[in-house]
Image: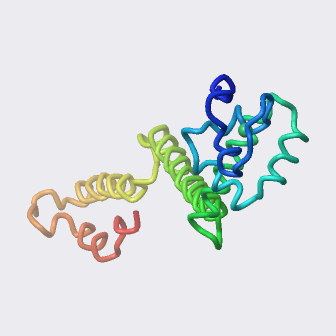
Amino acid sequence: MASSSCYNSPCAACKFLRRKCLPGCIFAPHFPPEEPHKFANVHKIFGASNVTKLLNEVLPHQREDAVNTLAYEAEARVRDPVYGCVSAITFLQRQVERLEKELDSAKADLMRYASNDMSQPLIGTHHHEGENIGSTLHNMAMSRRMGYDHHGGGSYFPWNDQNNSGGGGGNI
Ligand SMILES: [Zn+2]
């Protein structure tokens, strides 16, 4: 990355530490001079010698990720000295929990709708409507049989009042 420009200008780390940036400087590939506060944050939070030690402990191909995560953690700690990146982790964990709950209730809704669709013609959640229709038909047949056909008007459907006051359909 910035290793080629290392000879011309010192890397951000060596510039910050006021030392000569030698060829093979472990910081040079990861702390280019054009990003001075990336190293400043990392040094402030972790200390240059700890970062050197850490970079030497990990494999060369892991150093880029190590530096980027150190820089992220350091910046978060500089911004929020109390919680650092833990505040971001907590926020995201709560978001995950909330979204999982939403997902669960959406799945439950879906299951309910799916089972309603399948059983709708017979029973379903609109149980009371089905019941009402059933009892209406039953009562109409009964009233016909009992010779109430001629009455008509409000008194012809007395069960409607019963059902409304009984709160049959209000539950769903
Ligand atoms: Zn350097």
Displayed-image quarter of ligand 1? top right
- The relative height of residue 40 versus residue 119 in the rendered view (above or below) is below
Q: x, y (%) of residue 92? A: 59, 56
Toward the viewer: 143 or 133? Answer: 133
Residue at image coords 56%, 64%: 79
Toward the viewer: 116 or 68? Answer: 68
- The relative height of residue 118 versus residue 18 in the rendered view (above or below) is above
Toward the viewer: 50 or 6? Answer: 6
Residue at image coords 70%, 31%: 29
Q: x, y (%) of residue 44? A: 69, 61
Q: Quadrant of the N terminus?
A: top right
* Applied colour scheme: rainbow
- The relative height of residue 72 versus residue 29 in the rendered view (above or below) is below
Q: Residue 62 is drawn in which quadrant?
A: top right
Q: Quadrant of the C terminus?
A: bottom left
Residue at image coords 54%, 38%: 34
Asked whether, in this view, residue 3 is left or right of residue 54, the answer is: left
Q: x, y (%) of residue 104? A: 58, 52
Asked whether, in this view, residue 109 is left or right of residue 73, the answer is: left
Toward the viewer: 103 or 63? Answer: 63
